[in-house]
Amino acid sequence: MVYPLLWMVSASFKDDVEIFQSSSLIPQEPTFKNYIYGWRGVSGYTFGKFLFNSFLICFVGIVANIFSCSMAAFAFAKLNFRFKNIFFAIMMTTLMLPIHVRLIPQYIIFNKMGWVDTFFPLTIPRFFAVDGFFVFLLVQFMRNIPNEIVDAARIDGASALQIYAKIVMPLSKPALVTVAIFTFIWTWNDFLSQMIYLSSPSKFTVSLALRMFVDATGESSWGALFSMSCVSLLPLFIMFIVFQRFLVEGIMMGSLKG
């Protein structure tokens, strides 16, 4: 598991010839030119532009998922309404639908709305709790919150929205952090959806920008590709290390009930 990562880091300090001629992890003549060349980017845009686009989509996606998925989970976990179990079962069935089944009809809809080549298809749908996995994770976590607390708040005159905002949300912090981490990782690494909906280089994300180092000009800039791959991995490592405790706690408490 670790060797490919070490090899990529090592290759980022080698020239293109040495990358494929030497299997050693120690570069013979270390060079930083790959990072300089890679940061210059492609199509007139620096790699910083692509990083900004990825961070923007991830940020909006995290906010949208935390807001919409937590509200849907709160309804399923703590509220009583007609056909709740049926709606929950329908939501669970969406987890079994592969993205390839939804891809064409979604593209037709977004194309008619004029959203193709914008960030809207990658961000706006998440405000409607479309990620069933996160809803399920939060439902499992919120069910562990004692109903006595919720009932006491109702007796004191708190509305459902106040219970959600002032009681359930603060107690669900580990699960919400888990949702944020997974949203960031999956959005950052997403290639297919971004390739389908984005066509202008000015809107490209990190995933699409890395591909351009290989086939944009007909020549493969392997050194720049590996160096910018290392740069693109840094946010993932930093986020996981910083929020590792919440990630483990959220998964464990969301998977246990009692």
Image (cartoon, rainbow, N blue to C red):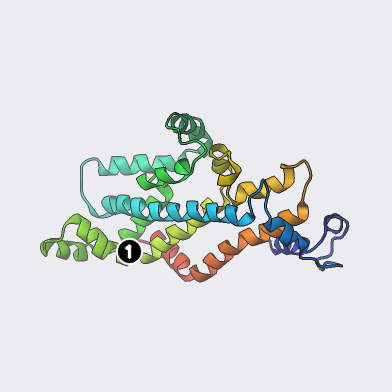
* Lateral position of residue 61 relative to residue 153, left or right: right
Residue 156 % position (x, y): 11, 65
* Lateral position of residue 160 relative to residue 216, left or right: left
Q: Nearer the viewer, residue 2 or 71?
A: 71
Residue under pointer 1? 258
Residue 138 % position (x, y): 36, 56
Q: Is residue 8 visible?
A: no
* Lateral position of residue 254 relative to residue 190, left or right: left
Mark 1 residue type: Gly
Q: Nearer the viewer, residue 162 or 144?
A: 162
Name which quarter of the figure residue 254 lies in: bottom left
Residue 162 % position (x, y): 20, 60
Residue shown at 75% from the left, 61% from the top: 12
User: Could you say whether the residue bearing mark 1 is in a helix, strand or loop?
Assistant: loop
Residue shown at 71% from the left, 56% from the top: 38
45 shown above or below 154 = above
Q: Is residue 199 visible?
A: yes
